[in-house]
Amino acid sequence: MDDDLASGTQPEGGAATAGRRRFDLDRTLALSDGIFAFALTLLVLSITVPAIGDAGSSEELAQALSDRSGELISWLISFAVIAGFWVRHNALTRLLVRVNGPFIVINFVFLALIALVPYPTELLGRFSNSTSFAFYAIVIALLVVVNAVEGDYAVTRGLTSKKEGPGERRARLVDSLSPAVVFLVSIPVVMVGGVLAGYLCWVAIAPVNVVTGRFAERARGT
Amino acid sequence: MDDDLASGTQPEGGAATAGRRRFDLDRTLALSDGIFAFALTLLVLSITVPAIGDAGSSEELAQALSDRSGELISWLISFAVIAGFWVRHNALTRLLVRVNGPFIVINFVFLALIALVPYPTELLGRFSNSTSFAFYAIVIALLVVVNAVEGDYAVTRGLTSKKEGPGERRARLVDSLSPAVVFLVSIPVVMVGGVLAGYLCWVAIAPVNVVTGRFAERARGT
Amino acid sequence: MDDDLASGTQPEGGAATAGRRRFDLDRTLALSDGIFAFALTLLVLSITVPAIGDAGSSEELAQALSDRSGELISWLISFAVIAGFWVRHNALTRLLVRVNGPFIVINFVFLALIALVPYPTELLGRFSNSTSFAFYAIVIALLVVVNAVEGDYAVTRGLTSKKEGPGERRARLVDSLSPAVVFLVSIPVVMVGGVLAGYLCWVAIAPVNVVTGRFAERARGT
Amino acid sequence: MDDDLASGTQPEGGAATAGRRRFDLDRTLALSDGIFAFALTLLVLSITVPAIGDAGSSEELAQALSDRSGELISWLISFAVIAGFWVRHNALTRLLVRVNGPFIVINFVFLALIALVPYPTELLGRFSNSTSFAFYAIVIALLVVVNAVEGDYAVTRGLTSKKEGPGERRARLVDSLSPAVVFLVSIPVVMVGGVLAGYLCWVAIAPVNVVTGRFAERARGT
């Protein structure tokens, strides 16, 4: 298996290699898109059907549904989170000219975490306490880190069509890793201040990202 | 994340931009098709297996299946509804020459609602009352609205290969939004007249659509 | 919606139409492949996890698994059936040069039945009686009929690159519809002779298909 | 169905045949990628949500999650196993220039086993005994064998762009079949030495693969 994985890194030439690179890249993207699409759709199973009898009245069902607002909110958060990672993954893979063995391994670690998201989503929706919140935050922070590692590996190993200087790289890493810091900080926050404080912490990701994004842009001199 | 999303709108030129547009468009369509296909297939989980013992007789199973006719009907309605949205989504994306950040966001809102459909379907199949009916109608009405917004954004922001005058736009909006009106009207109808009256209301969508379709066609001068 | 669906049949010309036909065809195939892939994978949920306690001994689990042999067999049958329909669908779509509205509708009816298969599979695996058997046989017979209708529509309406004479058409219809007859005949057989007799009936599909295949081949003069 | 399946092997010529080969190959890969992506994502359902009440405390949930470490480990193993098979399948299909009927059948047997993996994964995660371990090991060993058969068929029947001598073939078969031996050997090991000894046995696959990989490389004279 190892040499298959590593094969993309061997010095080769000609149309055969180009075809092979295209093939590996295309199938990696097809698999990634499939896992993104299924994870996004599978999230719906985290919203549970009320266990009232089939003959339940309109009012009982309305009450049971409003009790499920927590599940609906965690479904919505996870959909937005995975969609956000799809945008980031898309921005990275758009630049790729080829993939190699280690990149495919890193990408699988990333996809494993994406495929795992429905589980912490279900926990967060059903049990609104600091354990479910911390578990969710850790999975998302890991996703942020693996995504940053994947991007860094691709750019520094010449898998992308883009070159960058050391200043740009630092700015890119700060930009791509900063959401992980916010997610990890939200864990002690939720333990002290409760679940609502933790959610507010997550809302801080947008402005933090705007700041680090500006910083990364300035480093690229754009 | 923001600048990645917005990048499609920046003035650029050359083959690199064309390649990038192609890439973003292709992956957006691949993701959309995946979510459509998966939502269509996941619907089957809304039809529950009878909870009679494994040694249940033929007659018991036949009885339990006929009790599930409501679930089969709501499965069928949802399959037709999602298939109908696929046709509309296909008619829109067929015209696209590129996508940009806001379009991808609107498309994700649309896909989130598509991925949510199995949940109201299961509620409608299991609990035949005005709450499940209203919840279902609201989700579908939202889908109609988001789909219309997505189409309008694409056409007015120049993402499509088609131009249109103000008269055509008005006719297109009336055509694409009219099913939402029918779905919303069906909610008070079901509260007053019962679930069957609500279903009859939905059947009215086909003739309404024919009329608004003619209106839209005349506006396009075809 | 109606005019979008029907648009493929309007007389048009030029590269735009060719691009549009390509687009509609490609997305129809992408959706079909997605539904085939998900239905094939979702079948695994029809094999239930034994409800013995987590501390269950090795022997208890072995016993519980051998009790599930019926579920494994119905999983295997359904996987083979859907795979067989994929081969037939592939053989048809390979000939397509374009799709139109009615074809897309017929294809959705076909895909709805494919997406439904996990449900009768679960019933057949859990309840081995004439009701579950008849329900399964009816769904598969419907699939055979819709598949034959889809193929006939495509060939007779000029959607394919192939022309055929009236003799060939008759032979093709006999060939493609004959499995439906076997599935329908198996229903009275199972009512009189039990489930095993019904399964034996299904095994007869292979030799019947060889005969009708020869007949169809001779009509094509090959 | 038989002649459709066999059609790829008939002597034909010209652009039509090339188009048809491309089509069959593309759809086979699209279906395979769909099943891989879906099986990888469906694995998450094997991690069960704790059955404690919704009002469960933080500590109860933390305890329930740590009780689920077995499920998380088996989820992780299965994700790695399916990812590994994707890499091998990719390495094989990359060389394909066409597919024929028997190849499609072998590929479906392979995909059926991939789609089955979530079931033994769930058993292994929930019941940590020799029966669930042996069932899991047998399914994976079968996957290894079918994968080796698929590769051998493709190479020896001229479906790939690669030719090989008898020494190379022997080395390739040893390389591709050796993991099956390790999985089968792990079954008596687990019966005598317990589940942990069995897992250690699986860890031996990596070094064995390195050795057989070197052997295969030397045979290819690279």
Image (cartoon, coloured by chain):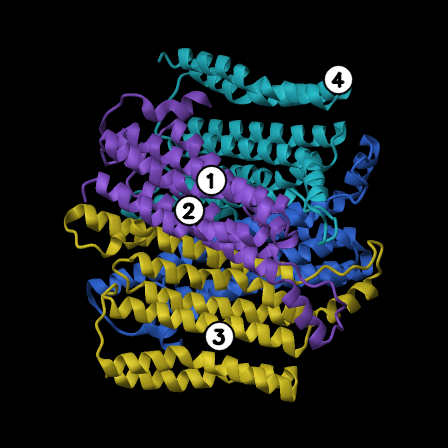
Chain colours: A blue, B cyan, C purple, D yellow
Q: Are marks 4 and 3 on the same chain?
A: no
Q: Residue at x 50, y 41 (%)?
A: C185
Earlier sequence position, callout 1 versus callout 2: 2
Residue denoted by label 1: C143
Please report contact status of discs 2 and 3: CB closer than 8 Å, yes or no: no
Residue denoted by label 3: D141
Q: Secondary structure at mark 2?
A: helix
Q: Amino acid at mark 3?
A: Ala
Question: Depth-wise, is mark 4 or mark 2 nearer the camera?
Answer: 2
Q: Secondary structure at mark 1?
A: helix
Q: CA distance from mark 1 to mark 2?
A: 8 Å
Residue denoted by label 2: C85
Question: Depth-wise, is mark 2 or mark 3 nearer the camera?
Answer: 2
Q: Amino acid at mark 1?
A: Leu
Q: Provide the chain ID for the residue under circle 3.
A: D
Q: Secondary structure at mark 4?
A: helix
Identify the mark at residue B193; answer none if there is no mark: 4
* C27 on left or right of D191: left
